[in-house]
Image: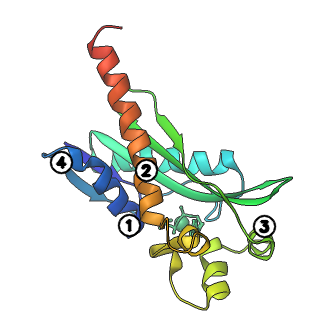
Amino acid sequence: MKIAIGTKNPTKVNAVKEAFSIFHDVTFFALDVSSGVSPQPITDEETIHGAINRANNALLEAVAEIGIGLEGGIVETNMGIFLCNWGALAASNEDVIIAGGSRILLPDEVGRAVLAGRELGDVMDDYTKTHNIRQNEGAIGIFTNGLVNRTEMFTELSKLLLGQYLYQTNKKGAGL
Ligand SMILES: O=P(O)(O)OP(=O)(O)OP(=O)(O)OC[C@H]1O[C@@H](n2cnc3c(O)ncnc32)[C@H](O)[C@@H]1O
Ligand SMILES: [Mg+2]
C-alpha cells in the first residue's frame, strides 16, 4: 500500500509512519505539496482546508492509495488564542476523512504576534530563544513541559484518521 504524506516536516512524517505501523506492507512518500491556504492558518476552517488540500495533492502527486494532510493553525476565541491542529485522509473514490487534534491556550503575547502576521514557528523560536521548534517538540511540547510533543500529537491525530477510514471501509465491506 502506498501512503503519500503532504509534507516533509519530520514530526508529521514520523507520526504518520507510527500510526500506519499496524500494516506490514506499506511504503511512504513524503512530498512538499501546496496547502492552498496561508503558511499560518488563523481559523479552524482555514486549517481544515489546508489539511484537506495537502491530503488530496499528495494522493494525486504520488499516485498513492491514501493521502494524508496534517496542518497546524491558531484560533481566536473569547477564552483566548488556541493552537489548533487538523488532519485529513484522502483515498480515491472515498469521501475525505477529517479529524481534529489537540488545542491548547497560547500565551497572549505569542497568539497576538501570530494574529499580527507572523508564523507560530518563528514566534516560538524567538520566545524560547531556540531554533526550529516546529520540526522538534513544537509549541505543544514547550507549553506542556515536554509531556506531549508535536510528533505524539500528530500520531494520535493520524490514528484518528486511519481508524475512521478502517471503520468506514469495513462497514462498506460488511454491506451496512
Ligand atoms: O512543512 P510544513 O508541513 O508546512 O510544517 P510546519 O511546521 O510549517 O507546520 P504547519 O504548516 O502545519 O503549521 C502552520 C504554522 O504553525 C506553526 N506551528 C503549528 N504548530 C506548531 C507547533 O506545535 N510548534 C511550532 N510551530 C507550530 C508552523 O511552524 C507554521 O508556522
Ligand atoms: Mg507550514
- Amino acid type at circle 1 is Lys
Q: Secondary structure at mark 1?
A: loop
Q: Is residue 12 visible?
A: yes
Q: Earlier along the polypeptide chain: callout 4 or callout 3?
A: 4
Q: Is mark 1 within 8 Å of ligand 1?
A: yes
Q: Are marks 4 and 3 in contact (CB under 8 Å)?
A: no
- Which residue is painted at 71% across and 59% down in the image? 82
Q: Secondary structure at mark 3?
A: helix
Q: Quadrant of residue 28?
A: bottom left
Q: Which is more toward the observer, 116 or 159?
A: 159
Residue that label 3 marks: 115
Residue that label 4 marks: 26
Q: Quadrant of the N terminus?
A: top left
Q: Quadrant of residue 165?
A: top left
Q: Which is more toward the observer, 38 or 173?
A: 173
Q: Earlier along the polypeptide chain: callout 1 or callout 4?
A: 1
In percent of width and height, residue 146 lies at: 50, 73
What is the number of the mark on residue 156?
2
